[in-house]
Image (cartoon, grey):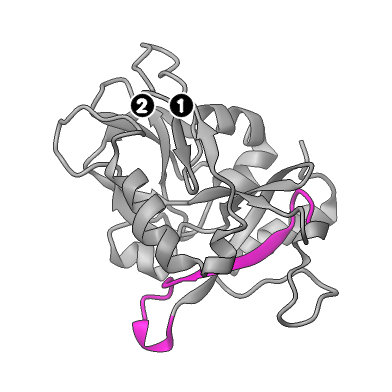
């Protein structure tokens, strides 16, 4: 597991306490883009989104955990739950990630609003094959191409595979914006957030619970849970 060592644990503990404040990699000047030097476990700022629930002061920088790095690409997932939305709009309607309202929003309004044209040019178009539900085999749907997505159960088994992963990646605080839009939180301010994997029924989707674990039975897709976007960042020219 890549989150090892006392120092790394302290960094992520601080992140949980101070989610959605500006965190930048050290050693780089204002306006620079040190993406080429990022590594697993880093926290970077990329794009902006309304998170404190106060539109008068403008959108806040989005903080991302560097979940993985493969060559000149880095897998990012938002450090906190930036918002809360239903996975799909229609009660009891069959849905997959391909047909979900959440996918349309992430690759539409969110992509266009959170990132500048220059930033969007760094986001890789990613092919995602969502796995079937592990117990009853509910279909995950067809392969999709996404600029922005949310993790599936397979990602959880890779990156959130032990107690440390659940503590420092699986658990995530809700932004004020997410709470305003219906995210339920525990006494620590942690939220439950959507996965793109199907639940046991074709009108459900899985989510990550307050303990940082995937709830494989899922919830009705029209319910409101928090959202943690993910993307692959092109760092080849940085």
Q: Position of residue 164 (x, y in %)?
A: 69, 41
Name the one closer to the observer, 36 or 12: 36
Name the one closer to the observer, 7 or 156: 156
* Outermost top residue: 136
Could you tell me how far apart the alpha carbons at marks 1 and 2 are, in whole angstroms? 8 Å
Give the quadrant of the C terminus. Answer: bottom right
Q: What element carries label 1?
A: loop
Q: Where is residue 113 in the image (x, y as percent from the top left)?
A: 41, 67
Name the one closer to the observer, 146 or 191: 146
Give the quadrant of the N terminus. Answer: top right
Q: Which residue is found at the position 71% from the left and 46% from the top? A: 73
Q: Which of the two labelled residues, at mark 1 and mark 2, occupies the earlier sequence position?
A: 1
Q: Does the magenta stretch include residue 51?
A: yes
Figure check: 51 above or below 87: below
For label 1, the residue is 130
Tell me where residue 198 sits by quadrant.
top left
Q: Can residue 184 be seen in this view?
A: no
Figure check: 98 above or below 139: below
**Which is in the foreground here, disc 1 or disc 2?**
1
Tell me where residue 30 sits by quadrant.
bottom right
* Outermost left residue: 91
Q: Position of residue 146 (x, y in %)?
A: 47, 42
Q: Which residue is found at the position 28% from the left and 58% from the top? A: 182
**What residue range appears in magenta?**
38-58
Q: Is mark 2 on a helix, strand or loop?
A: strand
Label 2 crowd (10 A; few <14 / some 14-19 / many >=20): many
Asked whether the beta carbons under mark 1 and mark 2 sit within 8 Å of each other, the answer is yes
Name the one closer to the observer, 44 or 160: 44
Q: Which residue is found at the position 44% from the left and 26% from the top? A: 143
Q: Where is residue 7 in the image (x, y as percent from the top left)?
A: 83, 57
Q: Which residue is found at the position 35% from the left and 82% from the top? A: 55
For label 2, the residue is 198
């Amino acid at each position: 597991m890549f989150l090892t060592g006392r120092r790394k644990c302290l960094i992520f503990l601080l992140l949980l306490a101070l989610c959605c404040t500006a965190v930048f990699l050290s050693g780089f000047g204002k306006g620079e883009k040190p993406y080429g030097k990022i590594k697993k476990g880093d926290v970077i700022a990329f794009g902006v989104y309304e998170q404190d629930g106060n539109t008068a002061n403008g959108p806040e920088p989005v903080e991302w955990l560097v979940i993985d790095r493969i060559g000149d690409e880095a897998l990012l997932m938002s450090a906190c739950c930036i918002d809360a939305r239903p996975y799909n709009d229609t009660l009891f309607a069959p849905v997959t990630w391909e047909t979900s309202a959440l996918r349309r929003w992430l690759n539409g309004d969110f992509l266009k609003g959170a990132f500048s044209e220059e930033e969007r040019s760094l986001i890789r178009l990613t092919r995602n094959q969502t796995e079937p539900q592990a117990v009853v085999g509910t279909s995950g749907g067809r392969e999709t191409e996404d600029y922005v997505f949310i993790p599936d159960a397979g990602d959880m088994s890779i990156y959130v595979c032990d107690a440390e992963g659940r503590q420092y990646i699986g658990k995530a605080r809700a932004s004020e914006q997410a709470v305003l839009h219906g995210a339920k939180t525990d006494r620590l301010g942690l939220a439950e957030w959507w996965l793109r994997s199907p639940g046991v029924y074709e009108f459900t989707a899985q989510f990550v619970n307050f303990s940082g674990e995937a709830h494989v039975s899922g919830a009705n897709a029209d319910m409101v849970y928090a959202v943690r976007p993910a993307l692959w960042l092109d760092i080849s020219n940085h």
